[in-house]
Image (spheres, grey):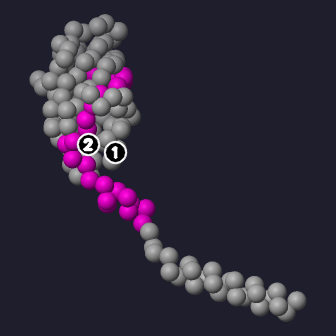
């Protein structure tokens, strides 16, 4: 019986010493190592969303429901194109497709996305570039989308 007690004490000491040698980790440790660049966003990303347009944005006279679907193509250099179908109060609004876009991306994976001659959005990108979330930042445009997933590298 005494031998079992000594063995248990020995095992407990080894485990305790082992725990003392483990390096302390931090929740955001992986985020510090990952840096986003323009090249993080590259490829085709599907999107769909709905929101509300408030006067006088986009020329509406009363609050209006908007829906859109399509895909973004990001080239990895701050430019891209959108292919989109846009409805306002259930009526298709003609949108030229492809539509040129520009984006910025900070090292912390936040950035902006602008449709040329159109709305602007804030974007939040996963460190591996596989997904992004989008929120409209123009006055009168209440819309959030995401996550938009990369479905192809081109």
- In this rendering, does residue 144 appear at all? no
Query: Does the magenta portion include 29?
Result: yes
**Identity of the residue furthest to the top in this view:** 91
Among numbered discs 2 and 1, the one appearing first in the sequence: 2
- Residue at left offset 25%, top offset 35%: 42
- According to the picture, the residue beneath numbered tag 1 turns out to be 128
Q: Secondary structure at mark 1?
A: loop
Residue 104's disc is none
* Residue situated in front as seen by the camera: 152 or 95: 152
- Residue at left offset 50%, top offset 80%: 21
Q: Are marks 2 and 1 in contact (CB under 8 Å)?
A: yes
The part of the image, by quadrant, that contains residue 137 is top left
* Residue situated in front as seen by the camera: 27 or 65: 27
- Residue at left offset 42%, top offset 66%: 26
Numbered disc total: 2
Say if 54 sits above or below 138 in the image: above
The part of the image, by quadrant, that contains residue 154 is top left
- Give the class, few, some or many, for how many residues have Cα within 10 Å of label 2's Cα (few <14, many ≥20): many
* Residue situated in front as seen by the camera: 133 or 142: 133
- According to the picture, the residue beneath numbered tag 2 turns out to be 40
Query: Does the magenta portion include 96?
Result: no
Q: Gap between marks 2 and 1, in whole Å?
A: 7 Å
Q: Position of residue 116 (x, y in %)?
A: 12, 25
Say if 65 sits above or below 38 in the image: above
Q: Position of residue 41 (x, y in %)?
A: 26, 38
Q: Position of residue 10 (x, y in %)?
A: 70, 88
Q: Position of residue 67 (x, y in %)?
A: 34, 18
Boundaries of the magenta span: 26-53
Q: Secondary structure at mark 2?
A: helix
């Amino acid at each position: 019986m005494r031998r079992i007690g000594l063995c248990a004490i020995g095992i407990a000491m080894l485990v305790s010493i082992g725990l003392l040698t483990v390096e302390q980790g931090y929740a955001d440790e992986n985020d510090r190592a990952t840096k986003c660049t323009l090249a993080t966003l590259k490829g085709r990303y599907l999107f769909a969303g709905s929101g509300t347009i408030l006067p006088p944005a986009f020329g509406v006279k009363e609050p209006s429901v908007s829906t859109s679907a399509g895909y973004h193509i990001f080239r990895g250099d701050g430019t891209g194109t959108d292919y989109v179908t846009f409805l306002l109060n259930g009526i298709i609004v003609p949108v030229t497709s492809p539509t040129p876009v520009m984006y910025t991306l900070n090292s912390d994976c936040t950035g902006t996305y602008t449709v040329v001659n159109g709305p602007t959005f804030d974007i939040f990108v996963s460190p591996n570039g596989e997904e992004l979330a989008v929120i409209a930042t123009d006055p009168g445009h209440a819309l959030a989308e995401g996550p938009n997933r990369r479905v192809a590298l081109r």
